[in-house]
Image (tube, rainbow, N blue to C red):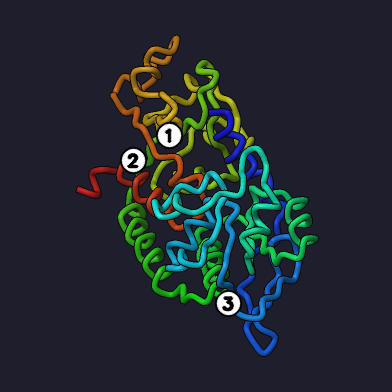
Amino acid sequence: MLRKLLFVTLLAALTLAACAPAVPSKGEAGIVVTDGLGREVKLESAAQRVVSLAPSNTEILFALGAGDKVVGRDEVSDYPEAALALPTVGGWSGFSAEAIVALEPDLVLAAEINSPELVSELEGLGLTVYYLSNPKTLEDLYVNIEIIATLTGRDATKLTDSLKARVAAVDEKIAPLSYRPSVFYEVDATDPSKPYTVGPGTFIDLLIQRAGGQNVVSLAGVTDSYPQIGLEQLVLTPPEIILLGDALYGQSAETVAARQGWDSLTAVIDGKVFPFDDNLVSRPGPRLIDGLEALAMLLHPEVFE
């Protein structure tokens, strides 16, 4: 669980340091774009052999229909299922520059989970590396999709239009609602007495709000992006709903109720402790919209009946 926390924390920590995404330009010089590190990246033509170093990038590539151009992936990229057939080039324990070079990519697609030092190392080996900034809003997500589409010779219009329509459908249902339940989103309960959660500045916090909820962390005035919250704070701002982003790691309504004092919380008493697929809200790719829809249905089932 701690490794998963480090993963999402790194995503959040690096967001503020990155440049805003910019759609690539195409012309006689080929494809030219400035990436999230402020580097001008050039391609003579659309990439044909891509190595993806982050699951969010991999998911965008496949959603665009560019999965056939992906020749390598990081070890965390496990969606869609077709990605699992690709060779891995490293991940948590570090990346193998040798393995990446051996795949002969004409584009290495990095993200904020990857260090600028890795980008420099790969660039020094003669590889073309594009560093994609994390989106800060859903609108930034659409821009990121357009960037990858241009770099790989795909058209993003159908995908982005579909995502925008789905977001608009959620907004239409949520906007008239005055009731916004308080939500505690659990990321990591390695210490069950004081689990990690999400705060302001994270995509999960943004999606909870967009789905018609209120993050208890914000209600409590906590400003950290990934704070640890104990029972003493939750009693002061009791959540009406608890979402377990760490459900795959053994947490459940039963384990939450068994924690000392937690059985007094409103969400536990009312039976509103739900498992949640954290990958839908922690990977800044197209499935963020799946996450938004899933959150909205959990927080406001009455408008989705």
Secondary-structure class at tag 1: strand
Q: Position of residue 168 (x, y in %)?
A: 37, 62
Q: Which residue is mark 1?
A: 183
Q: Locate residue 160, reporting x and y percent.
A: 43, 68
Dots 2, 1 in contact, CB < 8 A: yes
For the residues marked 3 and 1, what is the alpha-carbon distance in whole angstroms? 44 Å
Return the x and y of residue 208 as percentages of the image width and height: 44, 44
Left or right: residue 284 versus residue 96 is left
Q: CA distance from mark 2 to mark 3?
A: 42 Å
> Which residue corresponds to mark 2?
299
Three-letter residue code for mark 1 = Val
Type of amino acid under label 3: Ala
Above or below, 239 relative to 259:
below
- Amino acid, disc 2: Leu
Identify the residue position indicated by label 3 in the image.
Answer: 46
Q: Residue at x 55, y 35 (%)?
A: 4
